[in-house]
Image: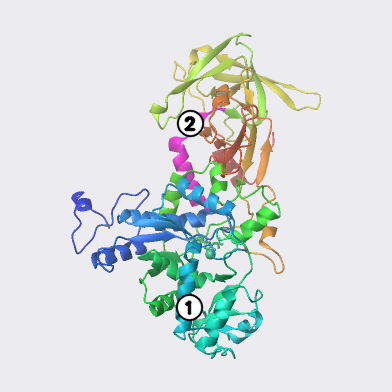
C-alpha cells in the first residue's frame, strides 16, 4: 500500500491499519505482516503483545536461510511492538553441542537482533514430562514395545491407513508404570517409546500415533545425565511455544502438516493456544542450505570449516565480507510466500554491492603486477596525491597516496597489440593513472623468454591530479601502486562454491558434492597494495578500485582467530566488481590473452 499522507504512519485508521513501520528495504507484500496486523486489530489475544520466537536446533551453524526466519521472527515482532525469544530446540542430545549454541547467539546479534528471553526446550523437560503423564492418565498416550522398524511398517502409506500396535490398548495403569520406569532408566535404548493415541488411519501421517518420547541414554549438553528419555521435536515444539505464550509461531512450509499435531497436544492439555503460520524456505541458486550437507562439507574437509568464506553460513558470509545490512535488505526484498521458490544469487550479490558501494573505503591494489617505468619522471623523487576515500561519501575524507617513477599496474591493463575496443594502455596510447597523471606507453622491455618484463612510458606533468588543462580526454583510467611504497598481502579470490545453479541436480548415484566448483578459491600472493592498507582494521571493508570488494580476514566465530596478522595481511574478496571488459570479451567468445 502507498501513503500520500505521512500522518498515516502515526495514526492508522481502524479499518485500514498502517503496516508501514520503518524498516529497511522496499516494502513488499507480506501475508505474515497482514496476519499479525489483523490479529492485533481483532484483539485475538486480548491485550497481549505480539510474541514470536526463533527456534534453531543447535546442531550446526546458522545459514542465510535462517537469516530469513530471523528477520521474519524478530523483524515483524519489532514492527508491532512485540517481543521475540531465542529458543534452542535442543531435544536431541546426540547431535547438539555448545559450540553451535555459542555461534548461534553471536550470529543473531551480528544480524542486528536482540532477544527478549533466551530459552531452551531442555528447560521444559520437567513440564513436558508432567504433561506426558497427564496424557497417559487421560488415556491419550501409551507405551509401545514395537521396534522402530515395526512402527514404521505399521504406519501405513499416504494411500493406505496404518495398523494399530498390539500394545495400543494397554491399561492406563500399565502405561503409567512402564512410562515412569522408562524415565527411571530401567529399559534399553530403542526398546520402548511413548506414543500419542490419536488415529492410525488419519490422512495426515503425523497424526498416526506419533512418538512422544524415546529412550536415549545420552548426555545432553545442558541437562547432563538427568534424563534418559527425550521428547521428540514434534512433542516439544508446540508446548514450548505455548509455555512462552508465543502468539505467532512462524516457521517454514515443511511444518504445515505438523500443525494439526501441535494443536492436538495444546487442545488436549488445555494450554495457551499459540498459532503457527508457515512461509517459504529461502533457496538460492548455486547455494546449498541444509545444515546436514553443510556439516558434511566441513567434516569431509571440502571447505575450511563452518566459517569458510565460501560457505552460506552467517559466519562464512561475515568472513567473506558480507554485511548484516545487505543480508537484511536482501531477505526483505526476496519476500515471503506460501510456495517454495528459488532466488538468484545475483540478487544477494546486488544488495551486497549496493551496500559496500556506499560504505566501503576505496583503495588501490594491483593483484598481478606489471612494472611501469615513467622515463621522464625524476628518479628518487616522490609525491603524494590526495585521493577521496569514498566518492559516494565525501565525509569519509581523503588519504595521501604516494607516487614515484616506478609503479605497478595490472598485467591485464596493458596489451602490446590491443584488440578492438581495448582502451587501456598500449604502445602510443594515453591513459589516466587514477588521481595522478596522464601517461603514454612508449616501449616494452622483454625478458629472455619473451614475456613483457616492464613497460616504459612518459607522463604529462600538466595533467597533475588527473585532468588535462587543454581538455583532452582519455578513454581509460587505471589503478596503480608506487613500487617503492607498495606493501604485500595475500589475496583470496572467492567464487561460487557450487558449479551448478541447482546443486541438488545430480546424476543418479551421485552426491551434491559432485557439483562443487573446483575453482571456488584462488590465492594470489603477488599483490602489491598502497601503503595505507597496512593500517586496515580487521574486518574493515574496502573497494579495491576496479578489482572488487575486499575485507581483511576477520574474527568470524567465537573461537576462531583471523588469518590476517599485521605481519601478513590477508584480504578476502567479498565480490568482484562487475567487469565491463570481461563482459565484452565473453560476448565475443574469446579468452583474453596478452
Ligand atoms: P536445515 O534444513 O538447514 O537443517 P532446519 O530447519 O533443520 O534447517 P532449524 O535449526 O530447525 O534448522 O531452523 C530454525 C528455524 O529456521 C526454523 O523455524 C526453520 O523453519 C527456519 N529455517 C531453516 N532453514 C530455512 C530456510 N532455508 N529459509 C527460511 N527459514 C529457514
Ligand atoms: Mg529443523
- Magenta region: which residues? 345-364
Q: Residue furthest right?
A: 448
Residue 527: image x %, image y %? Answer: 65, 29
Q: What label sits on residue 133 in the rendered view?
A: 1
User: Percent position (x, y) of residue 572?
Assistant: 59, 38
Q: Quadrant of the C terminus?
A: top right
Q: Residues within 10 Å of mark 1 (few under 14, many from 20)?
A: some
Q: For the stretch drawn in magenta, what is the main secondary structure?
A: helix
- Name the residue carrying label 2: 361
Q: Position of residue 53 (x, y in %)?
A: 41, 60
Label 1 sits on a secondary structure element that is helix
In the image, residue 581 lies in the stretch drawn in magenta: no
Q: Position of residue 392 (x, y in %)?
A: 41, 32
Give 423 or 312, whichever is nearer the viewer. Answer: 312
Left or right relative to 270: residue 43:
left
Q: Report whether residue 65 is seen.
A: yes
- Badge 2: few (under 14), some or many (20 or more) residues near its Cα, within 10 Å? many
| Picture quarter with the N terminus | bottom left
- Magenta-drawn stretch contains 358: yes
Q: Is mark 1 within 8 Å of ligand 2?
A: no
Q: Nearer the viewer, residue 549 or 424?
A: 549
Q: Residue at x 59, y 41 (%)?
A: 582
CA gap, disc 2 to disc 1?
A: 62 Å
Residue 291 in the image: above or below residue 542: below
Mark 2 or mark 1, whichever is nearer to me? 1
Q: How is the image coloured?
A: rainbow
Residue placed most toward the observer, 195 or 210: 195
Earlier sequence position, callout 2 versus callout 1: 1
Q: Which mark is residue 482?
A: none
Q: Is residue 362 left or right of residue 29?
A: right
Q: Secondary structure at mark 2?
A: strand
Give the quadrant of residue 289. bottom right
Amino acid at each position: 500500500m502507498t501513503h500520500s499522507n505521512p500522518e498515516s504512519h502515526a495514526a492508522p485508521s481502524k479499518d485500514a491499519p498502517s503496516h508501514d513501520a520503518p524498516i529497511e528495504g522496499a516494502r513488499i507484500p507480506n501475508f505474515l505482516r497482514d496476519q499479525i496486523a489483523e490479529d492485533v486489530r481483532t484483539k485475538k489475544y486480548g491485550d497481549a503483545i505480539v510474541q514470536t520466537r526463533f527456534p534453531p536446533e543447535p546442531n550446526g551453524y546458522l545459514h542465510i536461510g535462517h537469516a530469513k526466519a530471523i528477520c521474519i521472527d524478530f523483524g515483524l515482532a519489532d514492527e508491532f511492538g512485540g517481543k521475540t525469544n531465542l529458543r534452542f530446540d535442543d531435544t536431541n542430545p546426540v547431535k547438539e553441542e555448545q559450540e553451535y549454541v555459542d555461534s548461534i547467539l553471536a550470529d543473531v546479534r551480528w544480524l542486528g537482533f536482540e532477544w527478549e528471553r533466551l530459552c531452551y526446550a531442555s528447560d521444559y523437560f520437567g513440564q513436558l514430562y508432567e504433561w506426558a503423564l497427564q496424557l497417559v492418565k487421560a488415556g491419550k498416550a501409551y507405551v509401545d514395545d514395537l521396534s522402530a522398524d515395526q512402527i514404521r511398517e505399521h504406519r501405513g502409506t499416504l494411500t493406505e491407513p496404518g495398523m494399530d500396535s498390539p500394545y495400543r490398548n494397554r491399561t492406563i495403569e500399565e502405561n503409567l508404570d512402564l512410562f515412569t520406569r522408562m524415565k527411571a532408566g530401567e529399559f534399553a535404548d530403542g526398546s520402548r517409546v511413548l506414543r500419542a493415541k490419536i488415529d492410525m488411519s488419519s490422512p495426515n501421517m503425523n497424526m498416526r500415533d506419533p512418538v512422544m518420547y524415546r529412550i536415549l541414554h545420552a548426555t545432553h549438553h545442558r541437562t547432563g545425565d538427568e534424563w534418559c528419555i527425550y521428547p521428540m521435536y514434534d512433542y516439544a515444539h508446540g508446548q514450548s511455544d505455548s509455555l512462552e505464550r508465543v502468539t505467532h509461531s512462524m516457521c517454514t512450509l515443511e511444518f504445515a502438516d505438523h500443525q494439526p499435531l501441535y494443536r492436538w497436544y495444546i487442545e488436549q492439555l488445555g494450554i495457551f493456544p499459540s498459532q503457527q503460520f508457515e512461509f517459504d524456505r529461502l533457496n538460492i541458486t548455486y547455494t546449498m542450505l541444509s545444515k546436514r550437507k553443510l556439516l558434511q562439507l566441513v567434516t569431509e574437509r571440502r571447505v575450511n570449516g563452518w566459517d569458510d568464506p565460501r560457505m552460506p553460513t552467517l559466519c562464512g558470509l561475515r568472513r567473506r565480507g558480507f554485511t548484516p545490512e545487505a543480508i537484511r535488505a536482501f531477505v526483505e526484498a526476496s519476500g515471503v510466500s506460501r510456495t517454495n521458490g528459488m532466488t538468484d544469487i545475483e540478487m544477494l550479490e546486488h544488495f551486497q554491492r549496493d551496500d559496500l558501494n556506499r560504505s566501503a573505503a576505496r583503495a588501490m591494489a594491483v593483484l598481478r603486477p606489471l612494472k611501469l617505468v615513467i622515463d621522464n619522471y625524476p628518479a628518487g623523487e616522490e609525491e603524494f596525491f590526495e585521493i577521496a576515500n569514498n566518492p559516494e561519501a565525501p565525509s569519509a575524507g581523503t588519504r595521501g597516496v604516494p607516487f614515484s617513477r616506478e609503479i605497478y599496474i595490472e598485467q591485464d591493463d596493458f596489451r602490446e597489440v590491443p584488440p578492438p575496443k581495448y582502451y587501456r594502455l598500449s604502445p602510443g596510447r594515453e591513459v589516466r593513472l587514477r588521481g595522478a597523471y596522464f601517461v603514454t606507453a612508449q616501449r616494452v622491455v622483454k625478458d629472455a623468454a619473451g614475456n613483457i618484463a616492464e613497460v616504459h612510458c612518459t607522463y604529462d606533468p600538466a595533467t597533475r591530479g588527473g585532468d588535462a588543462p587543454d581538455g583532452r580526454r582519455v578513454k581509460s583510467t587505471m589503478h596503480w601502486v608506487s613500487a617503492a611504497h607498495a606493501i604485500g598481502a595475500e589475496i583470496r579470490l572467492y567464487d561460487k562454491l557450487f558449479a551448478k545453479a541447482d546443486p541438488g541436480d545430480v546424476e543418479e548415484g551421485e552426491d551434491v558434492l559432485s557439483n562443487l566448483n573446483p575453482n571456488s578459491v584462488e590465492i594470489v600472493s603477488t599483490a602489491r597494495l598502497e601503503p595505507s592498507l597496512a593500517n586496515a582494521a580487521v574486518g574493515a571493508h574496502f573497494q579495491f578500485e576496479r578489482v572488487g570488494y575486499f575485507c581483511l580476514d576477520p574474527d568470524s566465530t567465537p573461537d576462531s582467530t583471523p588469518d590476517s596478522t599485521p605481519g601478513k595481511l590477508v584480504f578476502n574478496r567479498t565480490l568482484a566488481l562487475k567487469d565491463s571488459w570481461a563482459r565484452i570479451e565473453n560476448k565475443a567468445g574469446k579468452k583474453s590473452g596478452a
